[in-house]
Image (tube, grey):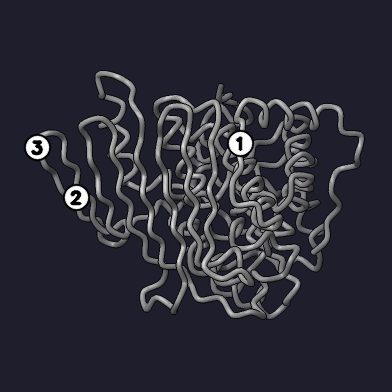
Amino acid sequence: MARSRLRGWPVPVSQFGKVNVGLIGCGQFAFSTVCFYLKKQRSTTFLSAFDPLVEQAQSLAHYYGFREIAPSPDALLNHAELAVLYVTSNHASHTPYAIAGLKRNKIVYIEKPISVSREQLVQLTQAIRQSTGNVFAGYNRPYARAIQLLHRYVANSAQAGPFSLYYVINGHLIPPDHWYRHPNEGTRICGNLSHWIDLTIHILAWRNLPEWLDIQLIWANPTELDDNLNVTLTTDKHDLISIQLTSRSEPFEGIREFINIQYNNVIAQIDDFRQMTVWQGAHRKTWRFSPKDVGHERAILQPFCQQNRPWAEVELSTLLTLFICDKIRQRQSASRFWTRQQVANLEADSQRSSTSLSTINP
């Protein structure tokens, strides 16, 4: 069911020499993570940076040696030397900026979430189909070393079986006035929980995807439905998935997560992506990852790499994320998500949509 799409550059862009990178959104994540790993990529040239807060753009551009600070998004997007666009702005603006880059046939990296509404996703899908550029998403956990090692065990299983996945995430404590809380930004479902929804789709795709997922939602506080909640998924293939997000206090070392996975005779326990232990029958093996490896470096460098994950996985995980987000807003605790139907509807809507593509709205 999942569609792979080999589009754009047939080899990593780094093989063409220095690559000019532009970045929209110069906040903490762009500064501490995205540009940090791009600087390690020797073929990167920092071309242009834009942020509505000029001080942030100046700080990032000065530290990393960007050639210029763009006075506007259009100025950056229309730069004749721009090759790769990184979108790391506020969540609601990810899709409009990505579309603007794709309309100019650029290579575009979109930090998660790629869209905060189905309308945005339809427009983004339409832009991807019409562009000769390529697109990558900032969902990094599929690129974590632990997940890639675990994939080998599942791939070598003698027969297909159901997955049991259990996630416990200690998330950031987000105050009521934080921009994440703005209604237009997609709630914590798009902003945070989408990471583990996406990882779930990625893992299920190792076998093959289910026809449907039944969704059960439990929230602790009826006045704050997208925080301190549990999402349980069951499927026609008898998979059992539980995702618990809790944020009673701020974790001292940042987000902490614990993942337990069982598939046939394989049991894996991932401790905050610092350690993973795998049992296969009587055999046990432990890996330690220092520093903690949640896949940021490999995900950020997708435009410079081959063998990236299929975009169809990202489309499906975004559809599921937006579906769950809508059910939470509707206070509907039980629902069913039909995978083939959702993908087909997205494809049909993106083909027949006569709506003009999103405009830039920083």
Residue drawn at (45%, 67%) of the image: 246
> Which quarter of the rendering shows the N terminus?
top right
* Residue 147 in the figure: left or right of residue 72: left
Looking at the rendered structure, the number of numbered marks drawn on it comes to 3
The alpha-carbon separation of the residues under discs 2 and 3 comes to 14 Å
Q: Earlier in the sequence, mark 1 or mark 3?
A: 3
Residue 114, x across and y down, in percent: 65, 49
Between 70 and 275, the one lying in front of the other is 275
In the picture of the structure, the residue carrying the numbered disc 3 is 283
In the picture of the structure, the residue carrying the numbered disc 2 is 287
In the picture of the structure, the residue carrying the numbered disc 1 is 337
Label 1: which secondary element = strand
Residue 139, x across and y down, in percent: 51, 49
Residue drawn at (40%, 40%) of the image: 240
Residue drawn at (40%, 31%) of the image: 238
- Which is more foreground, mark 1 or mark 3? 1
**Amino acid at circle 3:** His
Residue 341, x across and y down, in percent: 67, 27
How many C-alpha atoms fall within 10 Å of the one at disc 2: few (<14), some, or many (≥20)?
A: some
The alpha-carbon separation of the residues under discs 1 and 3 comes to 37 Å
**Amino acid at circle 2:** Trp
